Image (cartoon, rainbow, N blue to C red):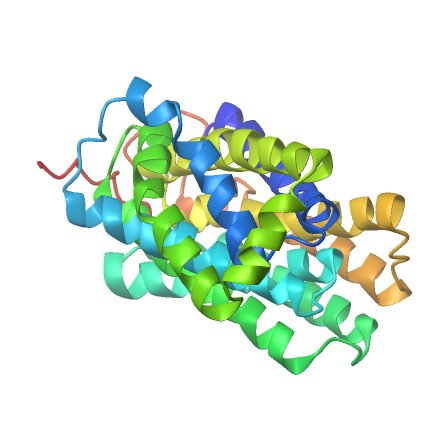
Amino acid sequence: MTRRDQALAALVATIWGFNFVVIDWGMGDVPPLLFLAVRFLAVLVPAVFLLPRPPVPWRTIVAVGTFMSLGQFGFLYVAMDAGMPPGLAGLVLQAQVVLTIGLAAVVLRERPTRPQVAGVLLGVVGLVVVGLGRGGHVPAVALLLCLSAAAMWAIGNVVSRASGARGGLSLTVWSALVVPLPLVALSLLVDGPVAVADGVAAFGWRAAFSTLYTAGLASLVGYGLFNSLLSRNPSSAVVPWILLVPPVAIGSAWALLDEVPSAGELAGGALLVLGVLVAQARWSRLSGRTRSTPGPRPRDEPAPLAPVAP
């Protein structure tokens, strides 16, 4: 990754880390699936009329939308509604890092470098340390739902990478086509028409601000940048940066929601940051050259896949 791409990856992680607090703050009495449907409706309109369809088959657009948007956030919002604290949600969701690199190695044959493996392992240790530091106060159902969200995100990452699409923002917007209607239908089925009607009535300024942030920054800016990074870099180089999300989520929840982190959370967050730095280290001894100098792409970093024709 270039330094510019690394800076963009860090920006995405910061936006997404603060996103958990904004979701919790804005959801209130609105049913989670309905709240999510409004978010992705805001992602779609008017952007879908302004951006061209990404140069990938419809099956790719539907797959990215189903896994990375509908699946990931559907499980996440329901998990937070079931009792998953925002700071801890930002942590547990990062199980997608290990899942993505493992899936990319099997499906895309992207072999991670030794620094990347070491960085991910440090990140995993950090996740475990933070998890142990939180105790057992989180409902098991909420934890399972959040882990399911991580699995959906990992599959979406690999699909996005395999598509080779160069228009990260257009892929984000067009893939959102598959999200709002299924979520409204699920909300009517799970919550009932009365709860949905009450949720619409309870949609106040806090919910509106949360929707603007999650749709504008987290989805359009965040996923637009993230999909672009995946299209021109190996998954194993991009995904470890998202390990920065938990420290941001924990810190913002501490400052704004009085979720005071334990010593385990602070130590684990430090390990997560260290894991990202190690994963991005340019170790010339491991590759036989300095990666910042011009030269052929290392064997363990395959060239980005060409866009698939519609």
Q: Is residue 260 above or below residue 222?
A: below
- Horizontal side of 37 relative to 142 (left or right) equals left
For residue 155, what is the image quadrant? bottom left
Can the viewer see residue 278?
no
Q: Please give left or right for residue 201 compared with residue 173 in the image.
A: right
**Location of residue 229 by image quarter:** top left
The image position of residue 35, as x and y in percent, is: 56, 49
| Residue at the (42%, 59%) spot, across then down | 71
Residue depicted at 13% across the width and 39% down the height: 308
Q: Whole-percent x and y of residue 30?
A: 63, 52
Q: How many marks?
A: 0
Q: Please name whichever residue, 260 or 35, is drawn nearer the observer in this view of the structure.
A: 35
Q: Nearer the viewer, residue 249 or 126?
A: 249
On screen, residue 258 above or below 212: below
Quarter of the figure that contains the N terminus: top left
Point out the image quarter for the C terminus: top left
Residue 132 can be seen, yes or no: yes
**Left or right placement of residue 308 versus residue 160 in this view:** left
Q: Residue at x 56, y 61 (%)?
A: 194
**Relative to 25, residue 135 above or below:** below
Residue 128's x, y, as percent? 69, 71
Q: Which residue is most to the top?
A: 50
Residue 16: percent from left, percent from top: 61, 42
Q: Residue at x 51, y 41 (%)?
A: 39
